[in-house]
């Protein structure tokens, strides 16, 4: 068998995108329209030719950031036809009650779409874009940042493919990122303590306008409506540790007993739940954090390759799409690729760290409904402030999903609101939670962004 030095050599004067997933395909379409030939190298076979899912979540969420990108590419209306609008999330609590939280105060929905159908649609659009070539079953073994070039292995052996630039869109276990980390600083790549299984859930027993979830503190089950009328379900539990975890519930019957004990309503609604729990694969959740995304004028990372995150805010894909848009915005602003890539990195890293933090934090918010009175008081006071001052305080999820404000700014806004709530409760006590609107208004400082524990007094 030929080694790399004996492999074929191929000259390609254009841009190489490593990874043909959702973000890679979108990136290629943006770039081909501006800079000419783009080759996408995808290690898997063409998903349109059979095979399903490739181990990925069945559904993804589209919010304002994602729609902006699809609109730029002329795909918004086509994609919207295969989406389901979701207006909120419904918590089914252990005491048998349920509570719906709207995604926005004015009724705007986010949109659920089957990942597989969206991927197929984007691949079709990419192949119809002049200058784009999509090559499947091409495993990139290494990346040379300086030439630049990629070493590719396929059924015919290996080849060294030289190009003008390389963009790494190859996911959490990125080969492209490894080349950058070897030159700069190692990335942080780790598996969360959580694992999950995808569960098929029949329709007809839940409101199809909302996402549904069952929080128990130590496990979470969620169900998302699909265009078919059925639901895409996910069971989240710890990988290891005390019961319940996938390690302690080792075996189909044990896992079924855990599920039935904690989720009686879904257990009754899914006739083959025992079989699914016994046979569906258990997937880990990998997160990535890295502080270098670019190399000179030849290389950049996008999407999960540089910021894989927990899925609980539904922004992994939207953030990756926004990476691609920000990259071309920076390139449109200057003809100097070195300056443009540096501006892209500076613009996106803080945002990626912020939404990754929020996404992981959101799991604990969803899985653990407030139990103690202190947490309840904080939540009620936050909601009252948002309702009383809608122009000054916007719910965190609404800022993420329905605006294009930077994720870092969203996080700072939320932290300021947290500090304000703590300050008000510290100074005035829990009676402020049920005080009249006029009293609460009087206790709010003129500038809540600069609040301290000393300046939130009533006038």
Image (cartoon, helix red, strand yellow):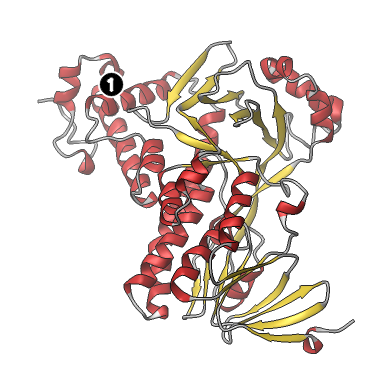
Identify whether 132 is placed above or below 257.
Answer: below
**Is any part of residue 221 visible from this angle?**
yes
Q: Is residue 369 left or right of residue 41?
A: left
| Residue 111 % position (x, y) | 49, 36
Q: Is residue 376 left or right of residue 229?
A: left
Q: Pointer 1: residues within 10 angstroms few (<14), some, or many (20+)?
A: few
Query: For the point 48% across and 51% down, which residue is it?
Result: 75
State the quadrant of the C terminus.
top left
In terms of image quadrants, where is residue 74? bottom left
**Is any part of residue 218 visible from this angle?**
no
Query: For the point 56% across and 85% down, which residue is it?
Result: 146
State the quadrant of the N terminus.
bottom right
| Residue 300 % position (x, y) | 51, 71
| Residue 376 % position (x, y) | 41, 21
Name, please, the residue furthest toward the right. 1
Name, please, the residue furthest toward the left. 459
| Residue 13 % position (x, y) | 57, 84
Could you tell me how many numbered marks the image carries? 1
In terms of image quadrants, where is residue 172? bottom right
Q: Nearer the viewer, residue 330 or 443?
A: 330
Identify whether 142 is placed above or below 421.
Answer: below
Q: Nearer the viewer, residue 295 or 71?
A: 71
Where is mark 1, residue-wise?
A: 429
Q: Nearer the viewer, residue 203 or 74?
A: 74
Identify whether 384 is placed above or below 141.
Answer: above
Query: For the point 37% across and 81% down, which residue is it?
Result: 336
Name, please, the residue furthest toward the top. 96
Identify whether 148 is placed above or below 280.
Answer: below
Give the structural element (helix, strand or loop) at label 1.
loop
């Amino acid at each position: 068998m030929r080694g790399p030095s004996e492999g074929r050599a191929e000259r390609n004067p254009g841009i190489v995108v490593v990874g043909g997933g959702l973000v890679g395909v979108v990136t290629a379409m943006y770039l081909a329209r501006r800079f000419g030939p783009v080759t996408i190298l995808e290690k898997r076979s063409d998903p349109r030719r059979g095979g399903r899912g490739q181990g990925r979540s069945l559904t993804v969420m589209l919010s304002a950031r994602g729609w902006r990108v699809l609109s730029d590419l002329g795909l918004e209306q086509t994609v919207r036809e295969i989406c389901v609008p979701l207006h909120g999330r419904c918590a089914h609590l252990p005491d048998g009650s349920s509570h719906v939280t709207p995604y926005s105060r004015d009724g705007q929905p986010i949109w659920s779409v089957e990942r597989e159908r969206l991927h197929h649609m984007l691949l079709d659009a990419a192949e119809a874009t002049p200058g784009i070539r999509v090559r499947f079953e091409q495993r990139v073994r290494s990346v040379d940042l300086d030439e630049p070039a990629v070493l590719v292995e396929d059924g015919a052996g290996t080849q060294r493919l030289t190009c003008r630039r390389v963009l790494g869109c190859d996911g959490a276990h990125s080969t492209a990122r490894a080349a950058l980390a070897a030159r700069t600083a190692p990335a942080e790549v780790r598996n969360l303590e959580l694992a999950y299984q995808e569960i098929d859930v029949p329709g007809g027993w839940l409101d199809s306008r909302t996402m549904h979830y069952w929080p128990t503190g130590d496990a979470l089950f969620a169900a998302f409506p699909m265009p078919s009328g059925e639901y895409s379900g996910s069971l989240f539990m710890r990988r290891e540790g005390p019961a319940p975890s996938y390690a302690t519930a080792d075996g189909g019957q044990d896992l079924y007993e855990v599920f039935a004990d904690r989720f009686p309503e879904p257990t009754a609604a899914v006739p083959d739940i025992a079989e699914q729990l016994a046979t569906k694969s258990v997937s880990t959740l990998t997160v990535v954090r890295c502080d270098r995304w670019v190399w000179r004028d030849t290389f950049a990372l996008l999407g999960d390759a540089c910021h894989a995150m927990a899925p609980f805010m539904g922004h992994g894909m939207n953030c990756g799409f926004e990476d691609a848009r920000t990259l071309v915005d920076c390139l449109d602003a200057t003809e100097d690729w070195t300056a443009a890539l540096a501006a892209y990195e500076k613009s996106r890293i803080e945002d990626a760290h912020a939404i990754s933090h929020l996404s992981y934090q959101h799991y604990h918010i969803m899985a653990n409904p407030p139990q103690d009175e202190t947490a309840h008081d904080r939540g009620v006071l936050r909601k009252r402030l948002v309702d009383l001052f809608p122009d000054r305080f916007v719910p965190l999820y609404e800022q993420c999903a329905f605006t294009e404000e930077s994720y870092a700014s969203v996080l700072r806004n939320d932290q300021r609101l947290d500090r304000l709530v703590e300050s008000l409760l510290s100074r005035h006590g829990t009676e402020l939670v049920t005080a009249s609107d006029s009293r609460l208004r009087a206790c709010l400082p003129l500038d809540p962004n600069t609040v301290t524990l000393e300046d939130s007094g009533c006038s």
